[in-house]
Amino acid sequence: MALSDGAKERLSLVIELVKTVFHYGYIPAVVYLGFKQGAEPGMPEIALSNLLWLLPAGQVWLATRGILTKHFPVRMQSLRVISRLLGAQPLAGAQCRAVKRWVSPTMRVIVLRKKALGPQPEQRRSQFLEWNEEVELRCFSKRLGEEFEGKALREAFVQPEWANVQEFQARQAGDTAFEPVAHNRELAENGAQIISQTIRGAYAPSYPSDVVEGIHSHLTSQEMLAHVGKHLGIKDLIKSLEYPPEERSLADTFRALVGALALSSPPERVQRFVEDFLLCQMVGKDVYDIWAPAQPYEYMLRLLQAKGVEQVEPRLCNQSASNTILANFQVGLYDAKSKTCLGLGWGENIKTAKETAALDAIQRLHASD
C-alpha cells in the first residue's frame, strides 16, 4: 500500500532520529508514530514496546500525529503509565538515584574549605547539640548491665582538676549560688582497693606471693586500666581539662566506676565486674611471660633451700652447631643428692640455657606447691 507524502516524511523523521541515537550509543527518547486514532490510511504503526526498552530512565519524546513535541522529564512510574495507555508492554528498569545537581559542587567546596583550615582538634562529644548527659549515663549503665546510683555514677566521671577549674571560674564570675562539683578522687581510691583485693584473691591460691604481686602490678598499671576503660566507652563521658583524656584520667575513671558500683551493688557483683572486664585480660597470656625474676638462678636456689635442697648440679645435656650463629645448648639442673631433674632449658650459649633451665625449675616448683 502506497504511503502519502506526509506519512513518508514522518517515517523518514523517525528513521533519521533512530540512526542518530544509535550512532551516539544511547536512546534519549521514545518516538511513537503509530496513529491508532485518526491515522492516515496506509500509515504503518510503530509499536511503543519496540522502543521503550531502549530508553534510559529520564525523558520521553512523543510524536503524535506527525508533530514532534517538546521533550519533558518524567519518572519511571510515569513511563509505565504512558506505556499502559499506549498499549505497550510494562516498562522494567532501574530507579533514578535522585541526587540533585547542587550536591557534587557543594561537597567539593566543603572539602576545599576543610583543607584550607588545616587539621582541627578533636571536638568533645558533649559540645554537640544533641548531647544529653542524663540519657548517656543511663545508656552507659544499661550497656554494662549494672545498676549505679545516679549521683555516684555522675561523680565517677568528674576529674578533680576539672571540678577545681569550674569552682575557680564561678568565683571569678562572682556566682554566689555556685555549688562545688563532687569529683571522683574518693571513689577512685575505694575502687583501687577493691581491684587489688579481687586480683590477689583470684591468684593467691595458685601462685606464690611474688608471682601474685607481679600479676597485680601488670593488671593495675595505668596503661592496662586505661585500655579497659577506653573500650568500655568512658572516653566521651569523662569531664577533664584535656581531650582526648589522658591515660591517667581513663585509669582513674575506671577505678571510680568500680567504687561507684560498690555503693549500689553487693560485693559479689562488684567482684564479678572486675573479673569480667579486668581479669579477663589475662586470657591467652602465660603468667611467667608477665612475671620473671631478675636473677632466675639465684631465685631458684632460694626456693630449693626452703624445700631442703642444698646443692644443684648443672649439666650440659645437648648441643648443636656450637661454632655457628645458630648455636643451641641444652642445660639440665639436677639435685646433687637424689639426681632428679629440676629443670631443662635451651639457649644460644650455656649461660642463657642455664637461666632458662632455672625458669623451668621455678615453674615446676610452683606447680608442685
Image (cartoon, rainbow, N blue to C red):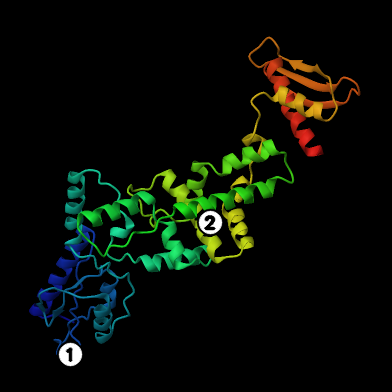
* Side of 212 relative to 39 (left or right): right
Q: Position of residue 348 (x, y in %)?
A: 67, 18
**Kind of residue at disc 2:** Val
Q: Position of residue 349 (x, y in %)?
A: 68, 15
Q: What element carries label 2?
A: helix
164 left or right of 223 in image: left
Q: Looking at the image, is 214 positioned above or below residue 19?
A: above
Q: In the image, what residue occupies the spot 19% across and 53% down?
A: 110
Considering the numbered disc 1 on the image, is that residue within a helix, a strand or a loop?
A: loop
Name the residue nearer the viewer: 44 or 315.
315
**On the rendered structure, is 186 left or right of 290?**
left
Residue sticking out furthest to the front: 176
Task: Tell me which residue sits at (81%, 26%) in the image.
Answer: 305
Give the total number of marks visible in the rendering: 2
Closer to the chain start, of discs 1 and 2, is 1
Dividing the picture into quadrants, the one containing residue 289 is top right
> On the image, numbered disc 2 is attached to which residue?
258
Residue 47 seen from this side: no
CB contact under 8 Å: marks 1 and 2: no
Q: Distance between the residues labelled 1 and 2?
A: 85 Å
Looking at the image, the residue that sits furthest to the top is 323
Where does the C terminus fall, quadrant-wise?
top right
* Residue that numbered label 1 is attached to: 37
Instruction: Choose between 33 and 236: the one closer to the eye.
Output: 236
